[in-house]
Amino acid sequence: MTPLHRMPVLTMLASLAILALAGCSRLTPTAPVAEQVPAPASASEPGPTTPPGPDAAPPPPSRLTGPNAVSIPRPPQTVLNWQVVTEQVVVPLVDTRVAGSRYELMFHAKSVEANTLVSIKEYDPDVVDVTFGPHGIEFGEPVTLSVDFSGTAADPKAEKWDGSEPVLFWLNEDTMRWEEVPGRTDWEKCRHIVLLEHFSRYVLGGKAGWRNQPSRELE
């Protein structure tokens, strides 16, 4: 075969070789693109935070304790084990008493607008620290709260009496501060009485600096 006759054959073989190489390149797997993972935030960058709960609030001054309490248990950052003392349904237009442990709630005719399951919770009967539920409910007519402080440092008849005057605080969860609730004291019955416009967490503390003899104006 002359060189001129071999030219078509060589051209055909070269074309087949090019096609084969192109097919192989299509079958060769390509390396996957690495997924872009965001770098972790540095320690100096603030991360998401959880809003503090009632137990994270600073304790009010001189929280009153009963005769069996050696000291105030648990630091304020510890989650407290609240126990239900009592639960009771309160209905509108009826004066209703809900009581348990040291606490007595008196609902009046216009206090609630619908049937309401009211609860009283405490974590220690010898620490005058309580939550009322439903938490955050507001009342059309204030609810009367009476707290028994007998046996505490505010009780003039108790061995541990230190001359304290009882005062009620409520926890403002917007500011995480304790605020005083105005009230009066029935010294004969050892009860502190206030009007509540809403439910929250409440603590009866002792305010120092009052006269060293109980008032007799309520006798």
Image: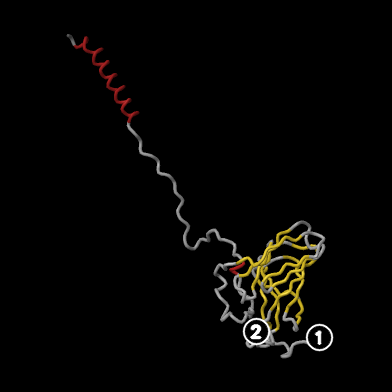
Name above or below for residue 217 compared with residue 145: below
Horizontal side, residue 207 vs residue 109: left or right: left
Horizontal side, residue 20 vs residue 185: left or right: left
Question: Which kind of residue does numbered mark 2 sit on?
Answer: Ala
Q: Quadrant of residue 96?
A: bottom right
Q: Position of residue 144 (x, y in %)?
A: 77, 70
Q: Position of residue 180 (x, y in %)?
A: 71, 75
- Residue that numbered label 2 is attached to: 153
Label 1: few (<14), some or many (≥20) within 10 Å?
A: few
Name above or below for residue 25 compared with residue 181: above
Q: Name the quarter where the C terminus is drawn.
A: bottom right
In the depicted view, which residue is nearer to us: 101 or 211?
101
Q: Which mark is residue 2?
A: none
In the depicted view, which residue is nearer to us: 97 or 23?
97
Horizontal side, residue 70 vs residue 142: left or right: left
Which residue is located at x 40 percent, y 44 percent?
34
Horizontal side, residue 49 vs residue 143: left or right: left
Q: Quadrant of residue 59?
A: bottom right
Secondary element at tag 1? loop
Q: Position of residue 39 (x, y in %)?
A: 45, 53
- Residue that numbered label 1 is attached to: 217
Q: Tell me which numbered mark, 1 or 2, is placed earlier along the sequence.
A: 2
Which residue is located at x 74 percent, y 87 percent?
214
Label 2: few (<14), some or many (≥20) within 10 Å?
A: many
